[in-house]
Image (cartoon, coloured by chain):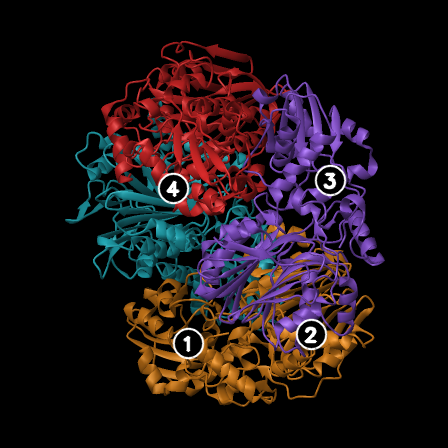
Chain colours: A cyan, B red, C purple, D orange
Amino acid sequence: MRKINEECGVFGIFAPEKTDVAHLTYYGLFALQHRGQESAGIVVNDDGVFRVHKDDGLVNDIFTPRIMETLGEGNMAVGHVRYGTTGSKGVVNAQPIVVRHIKGTMALAHNGNLINSYELREALEEQGSIFHTTSDTEVISYMITKERINACSIEEAIGRAVKKIKGAYSLIVMSPQKMIAVRDPNGFHPLCYGQRADGAYVIASETCALDSVGAKFIRDVLPGEMVVFTKSGVLSVKDNCDTAKPSMCIFEYIYFARPDSMIDGYSVHEARRKAGEFLAEEYKVDADIVIGVPDSGIDAALGYAKRSGIPYGVGLIKNKYIGRTFIAPGQKSRENLVRIKLNAVPSSVKGKRVIMVDDSIVRGTTSGPIVKLLRDAGATEVHMMVASPPFLNPCYYGTDVDSKENLIACKHTVKEIADIIGVDSLGYLNPKYLPYLAGDGTKGFCTACFDGKYPTEVPAQIRKDKFEQKITGKE
Amino acid sequence: MRKINEECGVFGIFAPEKTDVAHLTYYGLFALQHRGQESAGIVVNDDGVFRVHKDDGLVNDIFTPRIMETLGEGNMAVGHVRYGTTGSKGVVNAQPIVVRHIKGTMALAHNGNLINSYELREALEEQGSIFHTTSDTEVISYMITKERINACSIEEAIGRAVKKIKGAYSLIVMSPQKMIAVRDPNGFHPLCYGQRADGAYVIASETCALDSVGAKFIRDVLPGEMVVFTKSGVLSVKDNCDTAKPSMCIFEYIYFARPDSMIDGYSVHEARRKAGEFLAEEYKVDADIVIGVPDSGIDAALGYAKRSGIPYGVGLIKNKYIGRTFIAPGQKSRENLVRIKLNAVPSSVKGKRVIMVDDSIVRGTTSGPIVKLLRDAGATEVHMMVASPPFLNPCYYGTDVDSKENLIACKHTVKEIADIIGVDSLGYLNPKYLPYLAGDGTKGFCTACFDGKYPTEVPAQIRKDKFEQKITGKE
Amino acid sequence: MRKINEECGVFGIFAPEKTDVAHLTYYGLFALQHRGQESAGIVVNDDGVFRVHKDDGLVNDIFTPRIMETLGEGNMAVGHVRYGTTGSKGVVNAQPIVVRHIKGTMALAHNGNLINSYELREALEEQGSIFHTTSDTEVISYMITKERINACSIEEAIGRAVKKIKGAYSLIVMSPQKMIAVRDPNGFHPLCYGQRADGAYVIASETCALDSVGAKFIRDVLPGEMVVFTKSGVLSVKDNCDTAKPSMCIFEYIYFARPDSMIDGYSVHEARRKAGEFLAEEYKVDADIVIGVPDSGIDAALGYAKRSGIPYGVGLIKNKYIGRTFIAPGQKSRENLVRIKLNAVPSSVKGKRVIMVDDSIVRGTTSGPIVKLLRDAGATEVHMMVASPPFLNPCYYGTDVDSKENLIACKHTVKEIADIIGVDSLGYLNPKYLPYLAGDGTKGFCTACFDGKYPTEVPAQIRKDKFEQKITGKE
Amino acid sequence: MRKINEECGVFGIFAPEKTDVAHLTYYGLFALQHRGQESAGIVVNDDGVFRVHKDDGLVNDIFTPRIMETLGEGNMAVGHVRYGTTGSKGVVNAQPIVVRHIKGTMALAHNGNLINSYELREALEEQGSIFHTTSDTEVISYMITKERINACSIEEAIGRAVKKIKGAYSLIVMSPQKMIAVRDPNGFHPLCYGQRADGAYVIASETCALDSVGAKFIRDVLPGEMVVFTKSGVLSVKDNCDTAKPSMCIFEYIYFARPDSMIDGYSVHEARRKAGEFLAEEYKVDADIVIGVPDSGIDAALGYAKRSGIPYGVGLIKNKYIGRTFIAPGQKSRENLVRIKLNAVPSSVKGKRVIMVDDSIVRGTTSGPIVKLLRDAGATEVHMMVASPPFLNPCYYGTDVDSKENLIACKHTVKEIADIIGVDSLGYLNPKYLPYLAGDGTKGFCTACFDGKYPTEVPAQIRKDKFEQKITGKE
């Protein structure tokens, strides 16, 4: 059976009184749409009555006016956008999960990936537990419920449960009366909260979602911390803090998060810009123009241009009516889609030596057609700068890096890749710069996909499964 | 929290080899559509891989060609159509339920209602079980799973589990290798099986579904029996038979089942026809024409006409593009809909004394407008004959009889009802005839909705809940 | 180019003041849905502003609450349901047609078929007219507009135009201020009007639509008559009356219209019942039960039973969630659909000699499978009685009788047909009885599809086209 | 009656043999989606048989795989995307228009606006012509058809017709055998053609659509030119060239066209960049960063940064899941949408003096909220540079500039606007630079929306209507 790896976005709102929490959650999820486009869900808590709607698709398509009306008003709501890989589609895995139990109904929205979910699940099943989904979120909900029976409060139950789960989790739990935000001790994925002028607390994967609902950023949830929002106030539980090395996913800065977000105090935009500067420092190329591959190569291109002194220009235009290649499951051919997605700006590149900056190379299948666009438009040379190191290892913490046999860097040297893509030269970001993208190099990051240094143990079983899933593509 | 009372239809197919089980299940569910129009689902078992699709709506709308394609072929499939009362809508409660467990995935389709689900659920939750739905089917799936851990086979687990659940259940369980049909010891609801020319076994709530897929009826599943379909053959387990008094729901014959179905050996059409004959015996009315209210009053009208000697005629035409009032949740006003649903045939009723036969009177809100249609079309007298006794008691076994305060017979005498409806006379079927509708009067039936004689104990809790649910309409 | 033959339904309402004419038209069209299920449209006239919505599909699916809201209120509305043959699908041919012209906007809804539309169209095109559709309605709208230029009123223009068009038309025209109903001099298709308690006049193809909106029938529009509804009152123009022999389509009585409708003073239900009686008179069969094929064989079966003295019974049940075979374009196999559409009632037919009555036999492809259902359910003999004569000729007046090479009666003797269908005996209605189905035999009918006696000239061109269209199926 | 002002996109393909012209047209329209998002249509010409599909919505939503399949293959196709103002919605006005006539079926796709359509329409209606739509395209189709009767070819008819129509038109006409592209003598809107490697000719509003289907640009259609594509080759008719002053809409360069397009030989991207440079020349501001408002302010911001020497940065991020404000009809509040559409990048603007560049200011309602975003993110000063002059006059040639009473520049001085928007300073592009955006200042442009110098006469009627339409918003 295949485990689902998800990069997702979570959002929660805890309002002092009944208000349009569903609409605010809608806007929050819309701001987090880049974190998952496969399915979305909103659960409204109207004085203990939970109303839920989840479906496959984009926020904007799922939450029609009629659906929003049925969700109605409430004092709390939690939402989720999910990115699933091919094969795992289906509304059954959509989140938030709502579970009903004698101690009270509970809704969970989760971003991350557990590394001990197999054992937890096995143990639970041996006790007679049944599972409706293949997601970690259901495992977590069981763990909490098991503890809930003898715990005096939901937060106590969560506190006990999270000590048993291992891996990456940025979690929002909504009970009839409370909302709880929890982040794993490594702090793999972001989670922050803020407050609106009307007093409502807002929890979200990224600050851009706070901004979208007019909430003022208060602070990031700390690695290992649990923050409890109740009518009486906000409570921080730090039992689980400092039990692991901080390991924020560096790929959040490189690609996943929105550039207008601040994560753990550092600007995503700035991190990308710095990547461009580091590239310019390492690779000196004689060229006429620096361009970025929209959207996520733009920031690094600006950094490269600034540091190198070569003028920045707009060389590629993206059709604004298309989505994001990397993230949409089920596309047949990346190559065929490039031409309808991107187009060169002839006046920018004709007769020029072009430096093209992109955020990363995964399979290497899109870069070639883009380079061809530039050459067809008259570029005399194309040099490619990649604002991240080569992908070499799988991720076990919730980001769906492609499988080894698909990763071009696992099979080819940089020189070979340059030839495959058809560029005159190719430069990857030197891994040594990664710690300096956000901060002064002292902050810990998870850079395992680049260097294989996993911040946690990874059980043999999950390594094997991860491998097999990629090989077989079977459930 | 509100329990959902469901009258549903179940269908299963066990084929000797991979074939289009999804399409056959589609046709089977289409034949059972009258048993539930709120949601439907099909689970295909393709050599142990379960593919599922469930949604709100009618079979015909849910299972588009694209969806059918994704379901694909398999060697087994199980399907379900569900009727839920207002408020319980939502695909989350759609069936079949698919549960994943270390001992194997399992799909369940259930028709009926447990009377001890509260206690079972409470006990399960105290052990840390969580529930995604409010349906009994999830309780049953837990019960089976709990037993499964120590049982040597799925059928053994089911056998143990059903001894702990009480109430009404016609159940189909599909495991990776087997299909199991179970019926409660009272045999409240129908369940039968047959075989197609290609060897495939077909299990269904009613014989009409066997007919629709070209399966030849073999026999009814006995009250309390478990029938296990495996590659090696068909096995009957009768441990639980004869542990309770046979109590087939009489309302299946009166209204719920399709007239072309045979239930426990008796024709539904014939039962209705007999009801009409008994009415004619008891109520002699001087009239010119006997008409039936389409669709379910037609059979009894024919019986009345035959016994009374008054000619049968077509006095009311139903717009064939509309659904079935009693069963569709969410309609605003039954009265307003009558005129667009039914129309009188002036040439049949003008200047005539009309005997109008209907299957039952629930709230009494539709009968009045129908009588008005007849009078407007020129009927000089309208006498109403009702092919069932007055509804006086709630049902705890899965048929959604309205609440007492809505049941017109709980609040008014027959004379008063006649006045409210606006008929010249009104006759209900005498309860004494009920045992003779299907059989010679010796077979046991559940007639509790009419006479309050419940064939099982009914815990105080469920009585209270049933009452409250109707009063408050809240979950 | 293929001409579209349509059997359609038209509906119009002229209210004394602004009201919910859109909803009333919705209900009217819903009552006329049997006359056309391919597309539907409503045009609301809100003080001279026309709002229109047309689409492919059923009334109930097309006119969602949101659409109804956009249509809004008005003082007039006209609606249309259309039945198109395969290949002519597409909203472009949906009606009513709205045409904009300097003399005022105009909406037209038309039921029927012109026989001189080719020549009219050719002449118009030679003058530079362009056509957006392939329908007669656009030809008629041009003819009216051409006259409108020099006419002092819309009714004068219509009056002149209809003298130039030949064939079958039951037409409703809505101008900014008036509503006009016109019927061709032969009166091929029905058209009637009535009035609601609020004073609104209602025009419709059949009386059942008047009933559905609570309008009291006033009278049929006479063959050749034009009825003009204005603020000042109702005006009848009879210039064109008595210019042709009354030729009401007999097939309206036999199959097309709803049994609860009265057409030109005669009951549709009664006409069908009489057909059954005439059959019983001509064909004496020794049998145990008379059954009707739902829905349109029921009435005649009752007539046959009454006259023959053989008891009437319910032998076939139709799945109420399916539509009407004859009328739905695009179905792949009539045979395959029979079993999911119909089922036998075993208790009615087992061991019995059955007389099965149906309204007509077209291709003869459905009757065989139905007979098989009965035999499989245990019928010892099956005799078929058909409540109309054999179809032998094409219809040029708007009813889509199948092509000669598909009509079973054109290729086989009655004996052969009986063998093909698999019945013990087969009887068709003797054509001599047709004039007596509605009235005393003195009223004129168009019976051309049975006897080839066309009440108008039929140009060679249209005969040829009709033929070719059937052969080639090409546009 | 209201005239519809449309800015639209047209696309046509003429292939040497039967191929997937529908898919190519789909991609072409997708590339032109920015020119109109209200409705779209494709007409496939399969050896003289025209198959059409048009609907409201985006290309991607309308043309589902099922629809594409029904369109099938052909040797020619023409497509259209339409932008309609509020109130004119509805598929009835969707293009291409298909008209049927004795001389052959014809499909038309039109971008532009006639200034004499009222008189033409009036004259046509007086001759008995009827109109189904309110669009100019139907008028044009009539004009062509009228000429067609006595013309020896479709191109001759078009040639004659276009001499009678006045105003802006970039037109593609498809007949059974030919495809004809025509541009008005002023050349208001762009139209060009190219060729694919397989020999197929492609005509499109912008070069970006040629690129999207892999067609190599050949040349722009000249103002007044008609280009006829036939099996025998490509024919240019220049009768109508040089009959008017070249007057390419300057707003195509400033906002409407895609930056990767070349129009009449000049790069759209470059034109915008130049606008930024001219702004920098005229307005010297002491600032720390230059940012662009996405998407259309980016190019000018780069120009401003380059010329001024102030560094360019990314200060605003647009949610990529939202559409384009200016163009989408029916939005309730531009202000409310800004925050969910745009967000500031705090690391870029915090503590900085920001120069914000946008393409234009229409109502001035969006700029204020954007400035607020920047200030909330910590910008100490915000100076706004607008890459076009103030809008002061209506457009009669097909671009929907807002009405005078809505145009902020008609009601306020620049100083007042700066205060309303809340910026520290505000600079508009000096109109004197407009001729230098594309070319050396010698090429003629229509700049009427800025300076009121209309290149053609504008009849009083159309001035009045244009005015009234804006005031009343009524049809």
| Residue A397 disc label | 4
Amino acid carrying mark 1 in the image: Val
Q: Which residue is mark 3?
A: C433
Residue D82: % across, % down: 57, 68
Crowd around label 2: few <14 · some 14–19 · many ≥20 (10 Å): some
Q: Distance of mark 2 from mark 4, alpha carbons?
A: 78 Å
Q: Earlier in the sequence, mark 2 or mark 3?
A: 2
Q: Distance of mark 2 from mark 3, alpha carbons?
A: 43 Å
Q: Which quarter of the figure has residue A117? A: top left
Instruction: Decide which of B272, B196 is in the foreground and name it.
Output: B272
**Above or below for D398 versus A361:** below
Amino acid carrying mark 4 in the image: Tyr
Q: Quadrant of the C terminus of chain B?
A: top left
Left or right of D457: which side holds A242? Answer: left
- Residues at marks 2 and 4 touching, judged by CB atoms closer than 8 Å: no
Chain letter of mark 2 equals C
Instruction: Decide which of A182, D413 is in the foreground and name it.
Output: D413
Amino acid carrying mark 3 in the image: Tyr
Mark 2 vs mark 3, foreground winner is 3
User: At numbered mark 3, what does the secondary structure look like: helix, strand or loop?
Assistant: helix
User: At numbered mark 4, what does the secondary structure look like: helix, strand or loop?
Assistant: loop
User: At numbered mark 1, what does the secondary structure look like: helix, strand or loop?
Assistant: strand
- Residues at marks 1 and 3 touching, judged by CB atoms closer than 8 Å: no
Left or right of B369: which side holds D10? Answer: right
Residue B391: % across, % down: 34, 29
Q: Which residue is mark 2?
A: C147
Chain letter of mark 1 equals D
Left or right of A332: which side holds B411? Answer: left
